Image (spheres, grey):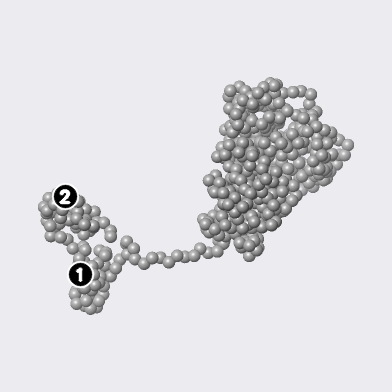
């Protein structure tokens, strides 16, 4: 194992005959570890049953986040890990947990657990549970998923004897804690996966209450694809002298994804989407929308075009969402239309295309969306649709990732290559619409006698020569603004003017019933034509 020594980095010694726990050195507080490990899973000191499960999955070399996080967690350290999506963060914390359970002789107390893993969404919780069962097929740890959308009775029964690994969403876990169905007195390790999303979604108060119910001597790790500075400050409250691991630039998509953007009007998006997803090289794709109703509308249009598609969003029950995911994984449908609920942590192999039908409001969400393709070293294609209203969102995304997306036409042919980000406007210039002439507040010059009445009380100034040309020395009073004789004598300015037919207003004084009364020109109730 070899490390690089540079500014802010610490070189690790070459220790071949000692396990990972012994060879992991303590790090200074606040130091970010960026060490390149040239190793294999067999060099990490994992238990033999865990290695057998890893080898049966065909894995031999750990990813950078796994090479750094696994030794740190096996050494009992708190970890703050940042890595690109799709680089194996789940295995980075799952393998050390399974190793500790395999080497431990104890068992969690009733209604409690040894390891607690918190996830922001139900889909991610189920995905983590599947990974734990896959890597623990030899040791067979007890695993329970606690989440909303399903009846709580079965969760309460399975938690009663105590379990090895509890995977939960914060809301449902708090419900069980309040009823006494779950206590966290036996927790030794707490993992917060996609920690920034949980905090962004408003789960921070729930996370604080959950962590307060765990022993103070617990081991805590936070993993996420992005770690903004405010989130990092909040995460620091949860950790004790953490080892900060960053294996890639924050919020940078992996290089195996071919990204592009197509500029078009909003009404053209549905037909363009059908065209993009109908190419022969599209084997399976995920389409992201901003709204739940939009996801249903897009899925219906794709089905109408004879494309096998289904939608997944928060308005659907957990069983409906799980059936849609299972159908997509098994190839029964090859297009999944989703909101950002599926943008994080859903590890589905073989996704060739990701289409941003609508750009996300949060730039980081773009990175998570397109991270559903090009997983496990494969390549993928990410296409973004952008209308005039979404150009500011596109600019925020390009500012975050540091470069401008390549522009393609409706056939996918590149028109403008990708280049470093600049602040100049993006896309074709908007077409300026001609301004209609006239209008309510338009002023007109006075007309000569016999050319009709005037429509405004603001005549344009005239030169002396123009006044003589009309044969008058002053502008004439328009017929429309002339005051009736009875209006001048009545003193009533509140009567409505007659516009169509006879007036239904009865004059307050003077005049005859049914006779129209008009306010003084320039009066307080003057109405524009």
Give SS at disc 1: loop
Residue at numbered disc 1? 476
Q: Nearer the viewer, residue 193 or 376?
A: 376
User: Which quarter of the figure has residue 464?
Assistant: bottom left
Q: Is residue 101 left or right of residue 462?
A: right
Q: Position of residue 472 (x, y in %)?
A: 19, 75
Q: Which residue is at 21% across, 70% downward?
A: 475
Front one among 32 and 198: 198
In the rendered view, tell whether residue 411 sits above or below residue 7: below
Residue named by callout 2? 506
| Residue 453 in picture, x, y percent from top left | 23, 67
How dense is the environment of label 1, judged by Cα within 10 Å: few (below 14), some, or many (20 and up)? some
Q: Is residue 443 visible?
A: yes
Query: Does 253 sit above or below residue 458?
Result: above
What residue is at 60 percent from the left and 36 percent from the top?
318
Tell which tag, 1 or 2, sits nearer the viewer.
2
Q: Residue at x 56, y 62 (%)?
A: 427
Quadrant in the rendering for residue 187 = top right
Q: Nearer the viewer, residue 225 or 384?
A: 384
In percent of the image, x 20 and y 69: which residue is there?
476
Between the C-alphas of marks 1 and 2, the distance is 32 Å
Callout 2 crowding tier (Cα within 10 Å): few <14, some 14–19, many ≥20: some
């Amino acid at each position: 194992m070899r490390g690089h020594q540079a500014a802010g980095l610490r070189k690790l010694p070459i220790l071949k005959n000692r396990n990972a726990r012994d060879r992991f050195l303590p790090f200074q507080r606040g130091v970010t570890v960026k060490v390149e490990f040239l190793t294999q899973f067999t060099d990490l000191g994992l238990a033999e049953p865990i290695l057998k499960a890893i080898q049966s999955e065909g894995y031999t070399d750990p990813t950078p986040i796994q090479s750094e996080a696994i030794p740190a967690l096996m050494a009992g350290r708190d970890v703050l890990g940042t890595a690109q999506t799709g680089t194996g963060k789940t295995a980075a914390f799952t393998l050390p947990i399974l190793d500790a359970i395999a080497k431990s002789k104890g068992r969690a107390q009733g209604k409690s657990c040894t390891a607690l893993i918190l996830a922001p969404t139900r889909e991610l919780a189920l995905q983590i549970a599947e990974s734990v069962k896959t890597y623990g097929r030899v040791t067979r740890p007890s695993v329970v998923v606690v989440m909303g959308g399903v009846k709580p009775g079965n969760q309460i029964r399975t938690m009663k004897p105590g379990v090895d690994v509890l995977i939960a969403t914060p809301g449902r876990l708090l419900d069980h804690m309040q009823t006494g169905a779950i206590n966290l007195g036996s927790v030794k390790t707490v993992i917060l996966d996609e920690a920034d999303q949980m905090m962004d979604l408003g789960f921070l108060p729930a996370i604080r209450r959950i962590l307060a119910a765990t022993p103070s001597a617990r081991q805590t790790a936070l993993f996420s694809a992005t770690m903004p500075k405010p989130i990092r400050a909040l995460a620091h409250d949860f950790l004790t002298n953490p080892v900060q691991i960053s294996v890639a630039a924050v919020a940078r998509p992996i290089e195996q994804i071919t990204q592009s953007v197509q500029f078009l009007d909003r009404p053209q998006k549905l037909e363009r989407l059908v065209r993009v997803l109908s190419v022969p090289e599209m084997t399976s794709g995920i389409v992201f929308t901003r709204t739940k109703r939009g996801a249903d509308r897009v899925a219906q249009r794709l089905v109408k075009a004879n494309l096998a598609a289904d939608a997944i969003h928060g308005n659907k029950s957990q069983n409906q969402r799980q059936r849609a995911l299972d159908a997509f994984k098994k190839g029964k449908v090859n297009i999944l239309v989703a909101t950002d609920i599926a943008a994080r942590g859903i590890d589905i192999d073989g996704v060739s295309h990701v289409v941003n039908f609508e750009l996300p409001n949060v730039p980081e969400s773009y990175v998570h969306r397109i991270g559903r393709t090009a997983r496990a070293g494969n390549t993928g294609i990410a296409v973004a649709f952008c209308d005039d209203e979404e150009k500011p969102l596109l600019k925020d995304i390009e500012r975050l990732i540091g470069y401008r997306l390549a522009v393609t036409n409706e056939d996918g042919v590149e028109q403008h290559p990708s280049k470093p980000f600049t602040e100049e406007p993006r896309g074709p210039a908007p077409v300026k619409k001609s301004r209609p002439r006239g209008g309510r507040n338009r002023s007109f010059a006075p007309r000569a006698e016999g050319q009709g009445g005037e429509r405004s009380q603001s005549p344009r100034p005239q030169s002396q020569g123009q006044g003589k040309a009309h044969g008058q020395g002053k502008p004439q009073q328009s017929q429309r603004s002339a005051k009736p004789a009875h209006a001048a004598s009545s003193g009533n300015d509140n009567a409505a003017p007659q516009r169509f037919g006879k007036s239904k207003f009865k004059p307050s004084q003077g005049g005859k019933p049914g006779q129209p009364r008009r306010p003084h020109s320039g009066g307080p109730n003057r109405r524009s034509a």
